[in-house]
Image (tube, rainbow, N blue to C red):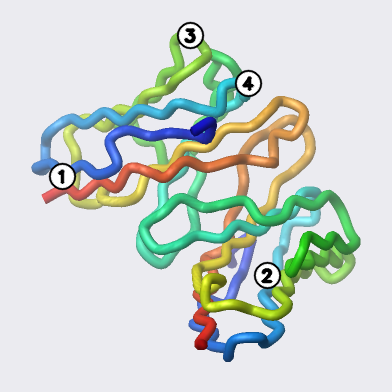
């Protein structure tokens, strides 16, 4: 399978714990995006990388959130001190530079904070 | 006011019907217009990708963009029960940013 992959697919955690998600983009795509989707809503942009550089961050990305893409390949999204309001589907997408609006999504990681 | 407005539905049609899904937007800077299909508890799947105004056809799907009215549509011909899903419109700007703005999504049910 050469699509975007995400791990884990589901995560249940207790409030206050830290969680980390991983995204592997399509291999030739140098842009990688993180979005968050809550029930009944469309995805909301969180941040994106061009290679290893993080170029834009949404105001939704509080200081408890950090994303990395150390070698320009896979990316991780960490949430520290999780809150119940963090419960959502976290989606990763990737694209080529020249068609950066043509984004391909992974299956998502569904986070439940108890 | 949201930048992108989409009627959440649900929309229920009989098998074989022509389905029309729509979005309106307020930001004239949007140049790229996408439609995604999302099945329950899955990631969005890119269906159509268009630039600026005009029509684009792919099989049973036709995307239309009217930038003068800030209105986009997705038509599905000969709808099938397997088309039952949530359809999301998304929009992007030119200028090297990668941020897409999504509508709320319209839930479609095609009944056999």
Labels 1 and 2 within one chain: no
Q: Earlier in the sequence, mark 3 or mark 4?
A: 4
User: Residue A93 has which mark?
Assistant: none
The residue where tag 1 is placed is A12
The image position of residue B7, as x and y in percent, is: 57, 77
User: Residue A71 has which mark?
Assistant: 3
Q: Is label 1 or label 4 in front?
A: 4
Disc 1 is attached to a residue of which chain? A
The residue where tag 2 is placed is B23
The Cα–Cα distance between marks 3 and 4, rounded to whole angstroms, is 14 Å
Labels 1 and 3 within one chain: yes
The Cα–Cα distance between marks 1 and 4, rounded to whole angstroms, is 32 Å
Residue B102 shows in this picture: yes
Q: Is residue B18 above or below residue A12?
A: below
The Cα–Cα distance between marks 1 and 2, rounded to whole angstroms, is 34 Å
State the residue at coordinates (59%, 67%). Answer: B1
Q: Are marks 3 and 4 in contact (CB under 8 Å)?
A: no
């Amino acid at each position: 399978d050469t699509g975007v992959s995400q791990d884990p697919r589901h995560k249940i955690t207790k409030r206050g714990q830290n969680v980390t998600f991983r995204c592997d983009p399509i291999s030739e795509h140098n842009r990688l995006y993180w979005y968050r989707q809550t029930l009944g809503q469309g995805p909301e942009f969180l941040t994106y990388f061009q290679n290893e550089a993080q170029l834009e961050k949404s105001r939704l990305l509080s200081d408890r959130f950090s994303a990395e893409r150390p070698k320009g390949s896979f990316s991780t999204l960490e949430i520290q001190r999780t809150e119940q309001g963090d419960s959502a589907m976290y989606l990763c997408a990737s694209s080529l530079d020249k068609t950066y609006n043509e984004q391909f999504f992974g299956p998502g990681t569904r986070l439940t904070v108890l | 006011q949201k930048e992108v407005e989409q009627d959440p539905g649900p929309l229920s049609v009989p098998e074989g019907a022509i389905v029309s899904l729509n979005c309106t937007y307020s930001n004239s800077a949007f140049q790229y217009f996408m439609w995604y299909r999302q099945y329950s508890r899955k990631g969005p799947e890119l269906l159509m990708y268009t630039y600026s105004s005009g029509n684009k056809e792919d099989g049973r799907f036709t995307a239309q963009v009217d930038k003068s009215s800030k209105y986009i549509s997705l038509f599905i011909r000969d709808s099938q029960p397997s088309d039952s899903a949530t359809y999301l419109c998304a929009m992007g700007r030119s200028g090297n940013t990668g941020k897409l703005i999504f509508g709320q999504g319209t839930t479609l049910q095609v009944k056999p």
